[in-house]
Image (cartoon, grey):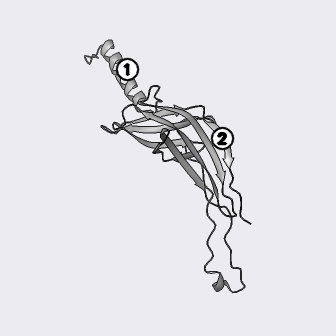
Amino acid sequence: MNFGIDHKSLALLAMILGLASCASQNALVQDPPFSVSEPQVVYWTAGRERGGSGMELSMRWNPHEPLAYGLDTLYFRGQALIPTIQDTETGMRLTVSAENPSRAKPDMIMDADSRKEVGNQPPMPLDSEVSIPFELKADEAILVYHRKSDGERFYYRISGIKEKPGRIPPSRQ
């Protein structure tokens, strides 16, 4: 049987389908429309009991086309974080931060009369890590951004994140 399809047409069709499936995957961009430098992370701890802890990741931010692209998410050490841009005296900075809620347990009422225990809160589930579509080293993050004209998403790997000494404010006694 001959359906009127030659080998060249079949090969061309296979190549087009192959390229279309590759384009839908999360491919990393090598030349983004911005530059980042001096990425650093600082972990902090509150200076009082039940004050919590957290981290702040920041870097210098220099967009080549500031109005054409928007930021979506930054994946770092198992967390999906929302990036913000801050205009500082030394230039623009991309910053993300995360706060770990205090793991201190609130007071619980324990009584032989169960009606007096009504106000107790059930235990909270432990946070689980976010599924990240890339393998990352401890000093790497993935920045997800989109083109505003058509909404297409792009992925950029940020490497060389330096860990700076943590901030622990003095406690008041």
Q: Nearer the viewer, residue 158 or 118?
A: 158
Sequence-wise, which precedes: disc 2 or disc 1? 1
Q: Measured along the vertical axis of the image, is residue 128 above or below residue 150?
A: below
Q: Measured along the vertical axis of the image, is residue 108 above or below residue 39?
A: below
Q: Is residue 49 left or right of residue 92?
A: right
Residue type at mark 2: give it. Answer: Lys
Residue 84: percent from left, percent from top? 46, 46
Disc 2/disc 1 C-alpha distance (Å): 48 Å
Residue 69: percent from left, percent from top? 37, 37
- Quadrant occupied by the C terminus: bottom right
Q: Secondary structure at mark 1?
A: helix
Q: Is residue 10 left or right of residue 135?
A: left
For marks 2 and 1, give the one nearer the viewer. 2
Residue at the far left: name it: 4
- Quadrant occupied by the N terminus: top left
Q: Residues within 10 Å of mark 1 (few under 14, many from 20)?
A: few
Q: Quadrant of residue 38?
A: top right
Residue type at mark 1: give it. Answer: Met
Q: Measured along the vertical axis of the image, is residue 71 above or below residue 125?
A: above
* x 71%, y 64%: residue: 172
* x 71%, y 83%: residue: 111
Q: Badge 1 is on which residue? A: 15
Q: Secondary structure at mark 2?
A: strand
Q: Quadrant of residue 170?
A: bottom right
Q: Badge 2 is on which residue? A: 164
